[in-house]
């Protein structure tokens, strides 16, 4: 049976250590060198012959990461790896899964097709799927969705008494419903209207007996933070205490992190799918169990 070697791309070191420990496999680093003209040299470690290689790379800010990732995948195969898989805790480009205006590229399909040409399998945490029912509809290789809900629910259960789970928009209902069921807690999904990347309006919380409950705002992706901030204001207007904000994927572009830290919250935490100071919930054991057996 071939051994598994986890190859970690730069920026994924902490997740790589946690994933290797959970999976009980060896780990090594992929070395990148940026030339002055913007091209990248990729160097893999020795000892790949006869191994199953898993490349770990979270695909936030994907444009700068994709070329080195594909170079590493092809080099691993050329250097004797029997199988080359991708562990991408965050998988990008899934929001553009339709042609919303004439001439637009359907980048979700293209991005996944490119990955499928270079890898034998893909595992990712809670991909942001809308019009596609599953990852299998985007990949023609084995593709595994890893739910973060068990880790999120355990983390909340250990720290929050009588939580009230709230999703900042209807898209978040699938995640908050799963976590709420595990906690045996009530939940409510708000409605969102987006008029621009950072121009968001969120519906009021509505009626309910929330007395004595601690609000927990849960969303899969924190990008600009605008949706979460609008939801925080709605909860304040409803007379609820400051919420604990939880994100599965802390993309946190631009000033989003500073804006959230200055908001009236009980804290902002995230899963370690993307390296960030807010990381508090370890989902690497879940990702490790989802990797196909060697």
Image: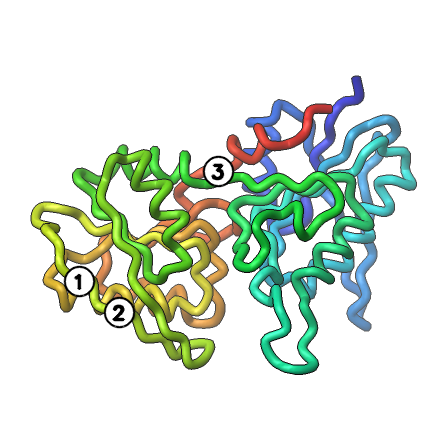
What residue is shown with label 2?
203
In the image, which disc is placed on residue 206?
1
Q: Residues within 10 Å of mark 2 (few under 14, many from 20)?
A: some
| Residue displayed at 23% across by 58% down | 265
The vertical placement of 28 against 254, above or below, is above
Q: Nearer the viewer, mark 3 or mark 1?
A: 1
Residue at the image position 25 percent from the left and 64 percent from the top? 232
Looking at the image, which residue is at 73% across and 58% down?
Answer: 66
Tell me if label 1 and label 2 are in contact, CB under 8 Å.
Answer: yes
**Residue nearest the observer in this picture, 18 or 89:** 89
Q: Are marks 3 and 2 in contact (CB under 8 Å)?
A: no
Q: Secondary structure at mark 2?
A: loop
Image position, residue 114 (x, y; %)? 77, 56
Q: Earlier in the sequence, mark 3 or mark 2?
A: 2
**In which quadrant of the rendered view does residue 50 lie?**
top right
Q: Is residue 287 above or below residue 112?
A: above
């Amino acid at each position: 049976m071939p051994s598994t070697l986890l190859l970690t791309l730069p920026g994924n070191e902490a997740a790589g250590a946690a994933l290797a420990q959970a999976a009980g496999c060896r780990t090594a680093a992929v070395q990148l060198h940026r030339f002055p003209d913007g091209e990248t040299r990729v160097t893999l470690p020795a000892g790949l012959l006869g191994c199953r290689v898993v490349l770990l790379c979270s695909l936030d800010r994907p444009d700068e990461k994709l070329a080195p990732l594909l170079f590493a995948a092809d080099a691993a195969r050329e250097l004797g790896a029997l199988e080359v898989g991708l562990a991408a805790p965050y998988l990008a480009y899934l929001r553009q899964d339709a042609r919303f205006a004439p001439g637009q590229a359907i980048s979700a399909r293209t991005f996944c097709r490119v990955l499928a040409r270079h890898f034998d399998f893909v595992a990712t945490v809670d991909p942001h799927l809308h019009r596609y029912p599953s990852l299998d509809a985007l990949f023609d290789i084995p593709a595994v969705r890893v739910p973060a809900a068990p880790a999120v629910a355990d983390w909340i259960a250990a720290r929050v008494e009588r939580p009230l789970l709230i999703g900042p928009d209807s898209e978040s209902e699938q995640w908050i419903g799963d976590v709420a069921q595990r906690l045996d807690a009530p939940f409510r999904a708000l409605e969102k209207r987006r008029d621009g990347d950072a121009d968001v309006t969120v519906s009021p919380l509505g009626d309910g007996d929330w007395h004595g409950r601690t609000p927990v705002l849960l969303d899969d992706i924190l990008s600009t933070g605008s949706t979460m901030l609008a939801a925080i204001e709605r909860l304040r207007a409803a007379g609820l205490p400051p919420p604990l904000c939880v994100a599965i994927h802390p993309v946190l572009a631009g000033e989003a992190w500073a804006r959230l830290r200055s908001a009236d919250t009980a804290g902002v935490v995230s899963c370690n799918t993307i390296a960030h100071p807010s990381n508090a919930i370890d989902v690497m054991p879940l990702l490790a169990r989802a990797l196909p057996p060697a």
